[in-house]
Image (cartoon, rainbow, N blue to C red):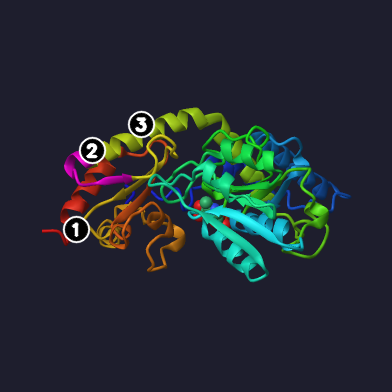
Amino acid sequence: MSHEPIYLDCHATTPVDPRVLEDMLPYFTAQCGNPAMSEHRHGEVAHRAVEQARQTVAESLGCRSGREIVFTGGATEANNMALFGALGACSGKRHVIASAIEHASVLAPLARLENFGVEVTLLPVDSCGRIDPECLRRALRPETRLVSVMFANNEIGTLQPVADIGRICREAGILFHCDAAQAVGHEPLDVEQLHIDLLSFCAHKFYGPKGIGGLYIRDTVATAHWQPILYGGGQEQGLRPGTLNVPAIVGMASALRLCMTEMDENQRNLREASGELFARLQRAFPQLRMNGDAEHKLARNLSITIPGIEASALMLLLKDTLSFSAGSACSSSDTKPSHVLRAIGLSDEECFQTIRLGLRPGVAIDKIARLLQRGIAAAPSFID
Ligand SMILES: Cc1ncc(COP(=O)(O)O)c(C=O)c1O
């Protein structure tokens, strides 16, 4: 019998699907070739595997060609590459618009770019975490070079009106970058239909390995005037030099293929599970509040504010049985209230009373509900 806690932190990362691991294994050992060395058989096999994976990823995202995919070490790198790439090299007045609830791997590069004269406008979100496309339209300026808005938020699961944003950017002739780390493999997504020019993603959010991701770069984006963030050999069209991580690339494509096939069923299952879990918790504790947008939401996300209960105390209490996070995993070492929860109007106090659950298909809702109920009832409350 296993005594592992139940894993409920799928926004932070997901376990590798055993079918994916199986596909990756030969590329660690027998097929160890460097895909850049395709003069010999081992290199040829590795090269073919990488190009097949690139094609799978490109087709899954609706790209016109595999050449539009550049493999990176994850979504942080892809976001940095998109922002420095598109904004770093151009001269003159540069303006960029992003939402106030972007991931740190978008906000921190933007803060850095501000030191180099880039002007940044952060758009507010409503109490569900959505930006208003009309507000975006009004923020556009003649010198606006890029708009960066995430597909789905990693804390509250809110999906942005990406189609509207894409249309506005296309009409205005402005690049649209979308951080889709939480959405790829989970939400239907087509870069052509949505008018996305740059799209970041990573495999470890969709049951693939950690440390691998990619950036979609529309073929019309002028990479001739691109500011690379890495310099070296000519891999990935010179845009991202370095020996490719073949097993991880194979694993990412394998995971994405599975997620695309199983997406509808997984979404149904997760929507039902998260709905039932919240309903049960709320029956027991009517003061609980769900954050995010009930309609436009990642099916696996449950962000819950529990008035009177410190999220970190609840986590500690349930540490041996449930693995979930308080707010965002990426800021768990941070003692500041989450910028996302603050942006949707929560007080500092409420931010620290908020937990985030990231469900997997097939999780034992019954058991999770019982454990959480017991934990919430036993947690020290500061409301009389
Ligand atoms: C929305 C979003 N963007 C970017 C990242 C960074 O991804 P990676 O861990 O692959 O660098 C994350 C990870 O938490 C995320 O949730």
Judging depth in this view, the residue of 362 and 88 nearest the camera is 88
At a point 41% along the width and 50% down the height, the residue shown is 9
Q: Is residue 67 above or below residue 96?
A: above
Judging depth in this view, the residue of 233 and 110 nearest the camera is 110
Say what secondary structure mark 2 lies in.
Answer: helix
The residue under label 2 is 280
Range covered by the magenta-colored residues: 282-290
Q: Is residue 117 above or below residue 368?
A: below
Q: Amino acid at mark 3?
A: Glu
Q: Amino acid at mark 2?
A: Arg
Judging depth in this view, the residue of 93 and 148 nearest the camera is 93
Regarding residue 13, the answer to whether it shows in the image is yes
Residue 123 point in image, percent of width and height:
51, 52
Mark 1 neighbour density, 10 Å: few (under 14) some (14–19) many (20 or more): some
Say left or right for 220 vs 139. right
Residue 227 point in image, percent of width and height:
76, 61
Regarding residue 199, the answer to whether it shows in the image is no
For the residues bearing labels 2 and 1, Cβ distance under 8 angstroms: no
Say what secondary structure mark 3 lies in.
Answer: helix
The residue under label 3 is 272
Q: Amino acid at mark 1?
A: Ala
Looking at the image, tell me whether mark 1 or mark 3 is earlier in sequence order: 3
At a point 55% along the width and 35% down the height, the residue shown is 259
The residue under label 1 is 379
